[in-house]
Amino acid sequence: MLFGLLCITFAIARVVPGDPARLAAGPDANEDMVETLRAKYGLDQPVPVQFVRYLRGVLVGDLGQSLRSRNAVADDLLRYFPNTFELVTLSLLLAVALGIPLGMLSAVYKDTWVDHTARIVSVSGVALPAFWLGLMLQLVIALHLGLLPLGGRLPLTASPPEPITHLLLVDALLRGQGDTFVAALRHAVLPVVTLCFPALTSIMRVNRAEMIETLKQDYIQSARAQGFSGLRIVTRYALRNAMIPTLTMIGLRYGWMLGGTVLVETVFDWPGIGLYAVNAAVSSDFQPIMGVTLLIGVNFMLANLLVDFAYGWLDPRIRRPGGA
Amino acid sequence: MTTRVGPPGALAGWLEERRSALGELRRLARIFARSASSLVGLGLVAAFLVVAAAGPWIVPYPEDARGAVHLERKLEPPSAAHWFGTDEVGTDVYTRVILGARVSLQIGLIITLVAALVGVPLGVVAGYAGGALGEVIMRVTDVFLSVPALMLALAVVGALGPGIVNAMIALSLVWWPGYVRLVQGKALALKGEAFVEAARAVGTGRCRIVFAHVLPNCVSPIVVKGSMDMGTAILAAAGLGFIGLGAQPPYPEWGAMISHGRNYLPTWWWYSTFPGVFIYLTVLGFNLLGDGLRDILDPKSRV
């Protein structure tokens, strides 16, 4: 799987129509300089040799060098990824925290106004362009009402905390910088809401459908007959069983969010790997793009692995060897 | 099939022959019409298609799509003359948004068609024939599915260079694996069905089984996915346009317009707002239509 991913990133980098060495050398470079650079990056070697070099590099954590900034891609990724990680994690938490209860409500109050409102919101979530939603939030909430900052991670005047975990919010708390924490949180609200909205609505949709199915089951009827309270039935008996497909959707949506950061980070000027990839893509700087694609792919695979573990935790039947 | 011409009542006879098929069609239409959201979806898609088809004839300033410049009326707010206002060179935003429908339709159709044309045959081979080849196909598909489509498309456009054609190539390249997955699962299930088994037992050739028995049963889910994908592909292409890798201005593509108009927020808000509303309505339409089609064509797979 991982090997396949490496093949793809390498193949993409190979289709660059322009000459990367010439691009790196700049418009004023002469032939000699271009040739020197070509040799330096190994671009004069046959393709299989380049591929082996690339694989060997990745194994030791060398993802190449940005042709534009001359920074090592691995260092850049280490610097930007924590920001993206914070953005995606907060969005996912918010999406789950709101999506599951809303889906439950929608299922319990099926075909009432609660359900109808929730469903209208949920179809909109899929259709609203994330970047446009972000712009409109900026327009109304940041620019007209002045409630929240427009973009970035911190105000220019704030001093970022000494890094411990490299997660800004966590570091601010650990260093006891309350002001910085609040400022960072305020900056995070709009991007998090923008990124979480489509995920929230699809989690809600799946959870609603599954809850409706589960609530029809015999054991729910018998629990009702035994006089368990409605709330207990819904949260203890039904939700747990409706969670498996919902989890699959959460795993899928995590991947979608990682891709969505490309747009959301662009809108909010959020210094993460999405914005980094966009800047690299606009200037045909292919090493950073390969690095980001690889990193996102690996993350997505890990997320799916976690989802598989969670299945077993939720449903003992899956845990048993030979179980479905 | 015989064609009878002339005698009165030919039409009635023709209808009589197809009565059961027509009845079925009417039944499906009734189910479809019972759902308000399906009808809204159909209405939105129909409106979008009309706008895309009639675009050049219904816009008030057709010359504005070809890069006309009217600096004397730049950045005017929405008015009777310019419903959606004007942009920084005085072009009518309404004209460009309407003409953008045609661009979006093209983008959506091409990406969805290419993805289906590549993905469906591969899916049939992987699901029905199986074997080592099927295994390889599914492995490659899984690898493609392991990276978010938009990210992969970004990487491909980054390599090919920005532009609307490259954006469509990139999105088509990352779009097909979904169809492989869908068709492979379906073909695998059909392989074990009694009627396919029976066809094999009486010595029907592989090709014939695939075309006569397997593919027709895959059509419904493909149509449903296709309808949804029209919306999603338009959304993805607009995303690429927004980050500057898709269509380049002054080409009337919605995502690129939003991106360009972004520089004029908040004072000249209409520039970015209206293209976004149109993307939203279009994608919403295709999604609701897809949902409605699934209800009538493929009720078992409802989510």
Image: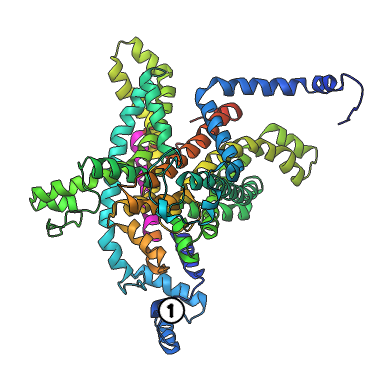
Would residue B18 be counted in the magenta stretch? no
**Which residue sits furthest right?**
B7
> What residue do we see at 37% from left, 27% from top?
A118
Tell whether B111 sits left or right of B303: right
Q: Quadrant of residue A134?
A: top left
Magenta range: A294-314
* Magenta-drawn stretch, dominant element (helix, strand or loop): helix
**Residue B180 in the image, given as x and y percentages of width and height:** 58, 47
Q: Is residue B222 left or right of residue A192?
A: right
Residue at the image position 66 percent from the left and 39 percent from the top: B191
In this view of the protein, which residue sits in the foreground, B273 or B12? B273
Which residue is depicted at the point 51% across and 79% down?
A46
Residue B254 image offset from top left, x and y in percent: 46, 48
State which quarter of the image contains the N terminus of chain B.
top right
The residue indicated by pointer 1 is A21
Q: Residue furthest left?
A: A176
